[in-house]
Image (cartoon, grey):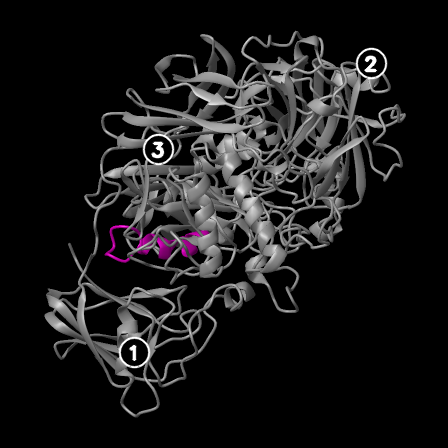
Amino acid sequence: MTNSRLGSWGEGRGMAAAAAVCMVAALVPAPLAAGRTTWNFNGGWKLRVDDVKEAAKPDHDDTDWKSVTLPHAWNEDEAFRVSIEKLPTGIAWYRKSFTPPKEAADQRVFIEFEGFRQGAEIFLNGTSLGFHEDGVTAVGYDLTPHLSSGENVIAVRTDNAWDYREQGTRQRYQWNDRNFNANYGGITKNVRLHVTAPLHQTLPLVNGLGTTGVYIYATDFDIHGGSATIHAESQVRNDSEKTMTFGYEVTVSDTDGKVLATFRADNPVAIAPGKTAVASASQVVSGLEWWSWGHGKLYDVTTRLVVGGKPLDSVVTRTGFRKTDFKKGMIGLNGRALQMKGYAQRTTNEWPALGGCVPPWLSDFSNGLMVESGANLVRWMHTCPWKQDVESCDRVGLMQAMPAGDAEHDVTGRRWDQRVEVMRASIVYNRNNPSILFYEGGNNGISEEHMTELKALRDEYDPHGGRAIGSRDMLDSKVAEYGGEMLYINKGSRIPFWAMEYSRDEGLRKYWDEFSPPYHKEGDGPPHKGEPAPAYNHNQDEHAIENVRRWYDYWEFRPGTGSRVNSGGVNIVFSDTNTHYRGEANYRTSGEVDAMRIPKDGFFAHQVMWDGWVDVETPRAHILGHWNYKPGVKKPVHVVSSADEVELILNGRSLGRNKNPEYRFLFTFPDIAWETGGIEAVGYDTSGKEICRAKHETTGEAKSLKLTTHISPGGGFRADGADVALVDVEVVDADGRRVPVAMNPVEFQLDGPAEWRGGIAQGPENHILSKTLPVECGINRVLIRSTTTAGGIRVRATSPGLEPAQAELVTTPPASGLPAAGLESAFLRGPTPEVPSFRATRVSVPVASVKAGENERDAMKAFDDDETTTWQNGRKKGSAWIEFTLERRATLSDVSLKLPGWRSRTYPLSISIDGREVYRGTTPTSLGYVTLPVAPVEGRVVRVQLVGKGETKDGFGGISEVADAANASDGPAVAPGRLGIVEADFHESP
């Protein structure tokens, strides 16, 4: 987002006088010396949920309307109280009265709405400025022709109907969907006002204004030397009545103001009245630090129009610089290979009783937790994220995959045109944000024609941003620059393939295991679609274990495991979400944190497995669960660790060592009898050196409550009517340690200028907005929201039999500036390391030729690096074999096969090398590939032969979404007694 010279826009004193207190109108606005001011326009709005006749008229009486600060979903009270399809819909009006300052005379005044849900008509002083209806993108309007020097009224009529139809075509929007796009209605994103000189750099608002703004990018990277050529391009418009000639100047500086370079365009630019032109300049800049994973290094690039030696218009673009590449099946960042590890997160990114309308610091809090869990990528689902989340990911160092708008399949006609329009607007709006690495064309495969069209958009508006464009699937596309199925494992040697979403299991945070209150037996819960649904009713132990199982395949085929590799995947979802559900709650509980962002055990399991760019770089261990049980309990103890060997120690005595983890990271110690004290896991490397350690201790009895507050690090708790504070409540023992099995009910009392928004827990209406709710596993969290009155706030918590607790907070008048002002970048992981990110563990041996028992002309399909093609034999007796001649003699370590029906088919196979059998066994079911170890026999001719019929069975616990061919194919059906191969890879040790 571009911005310069921040200020606050004062309200008028007519019928909206009561709303004036919602704004920081008393502050003196920044001067207009450089011809541009950007105002926070979120305060001082009035809301009425009703289709009020004549509400657009400036003299309409709105004194009894509700005063709100934007962003504000009018149906926020229902967020997580009801399931997605029951979220309220209807018409809601928003109004705001304001008076422009005298300094705005003879200037251009633009309004920028980051977005509405779903459609909106915008009025100024009773005149319609237009409709904006896609429910996703930003829109801007030139207010100048309709603006009065006195009081003005802007009014917005919003409609969030699930079946909303575009005004001009009566066509619905594909992504306005009851399954995944939680419907929080109204003006749900930020609003800004921009005042510019008649000669000005345009705003990046394709919708409404038809303008593209500023574009900053880098080329000619010297990663080690810290230099690159920085390019700046500004679309400039002349709204004056005469031809204007200007110079173009660019300054690159740190966010603290330290200047790295200033450079200028070679020649002045002349623009006739009513016309636009593009000004540009570039220069090599040294002393740069690269934006990276977990390292949100940003710079301010100021672009100026200079007339008569003085700046007439200045725009500051906050951006970062990084080098990317997408080749050989891998993704590179700053010259280092990177495997994708992260989450497919609902774009609404919602919270209980707030929906998606949260202050910027809370976006940082949530997105920063993803990075803390080891994630490097968030794939926003189905619709483009709002600008606040995009900028938040810049700060916390979290890469993004940015969709436009879609549902589950390709479309044609006007519905496709809508998707193209959203993609165009989203690219222009977000092309300066370094955290975006991928543009996503669809949540399912799209045609080559459509992919070509989207790629052309990218090349027109962001040709130098270092971003790949692709879509889900696209395994054989000649146009897409990345792809990958939703649930299964793909490998490739050409473009990167990463899983668009995996591990769709669910589990509530309140359930540790069947030995802990409330004693939830693994898998117990309601059926899904009439069938038992254990995968959607996990306890924390099994949910975390399933995350380990599902990650294993991606780890096994990571970069360094041959010439065909997998580039990772994203787990669905990060936080529990108010979208379609399958378990006992009325919201989806697939998150690694709950809806209030309290971690589940899966969060810590990911920290262990994901701590590295490709290979694990920092060894860790985490013991699942806790150590507060009752005498007589005997249970397995699960340790998730990246060590090579784990020892379990109970009260100082060893219970043995485990050198054979399942799924590489899961060390299980069965039948451990509980006794009070401490349980420790010690991890060792192959030389026996200790490299990590974890411990749980038995706590004392529950004694008291403990409150901990979280507020914005960028300016405290602001009395703007929109800021929030988090308050954690824990049940602790006499030593202040959280009691992990506590489920006590807690009653809260709130005093002072704040609004209770509460938290979430299992119970009636999920306890939304209730001031009484239980802790779960010893902890819970609640939200309080500021009012527009500054002052002291007290939160008091009580529970029968426990000592009470209270916390004090103070809200302060907000400073002048945009909502995210004062928030700083995070540098959790440090700069990009310059050492390699992986050690090669396999070397591919290419195939020179192939023979087969039948259908030999199709045999090349078994190693063509195309997972959409398959060789299989026919009905001829004895034809279920295929023989590969390698390019050279080799001593193979394994054969990796993708076999048709991999999810549910097993194959009894014999593998021989130069006639000597090196493997015999039955393949397991898988989510893609199976790796079969072979005896170390040197040779060149590898024969794979079926030696039995095998069987068909579901290998994944009846998870219907894994079995659903509409989600991802598991290959063509192969009859028992036949052999098929989708892809075969042959590896030797390095």
Question: Residue 862 location, x and y as percent?
Answer: 29, 72
Magenta stretch encompasses residue 224: no
Give the residue type at disc 2.
Arg
| Tally of numbered discs | 3
Q: Which residue is mark 3?
A: 322
**How far apart, in angstroms, are the residues tagged by discs 1 and 2?**
79 Å
**How far apart, in angstroms, are the residues tagged by discs 3 and 1?**
43 Å
Q: Residues within 10 Å of mark 1 (few under 14, many from 20)?
A: some
Q: In front here: 300 or 774?
A: 300
Task: Look at discs 3 and 2 and give the one toward the viewer.
Answer: 2
- Counting residues from the start of the chain, the first of labels 3 and 1 encountered is 3
> Residue 97: which disc?
none
Q: Which residues are magenta?
A: 545-564
Apparent side of residue 263 relative to residue 730 in the rendered image (left or right): left
Q: Which residue is mark 2?
A: 13
Q: Residues within 10 Å of mark 2 (few under 14, many from 20)?
A: some
Question: Residue 716 location, x and y as percent?
Answer: 59, 17
**How far apart, in angstroms, are the residues tagged by discs 3 and 2?**
49 Å
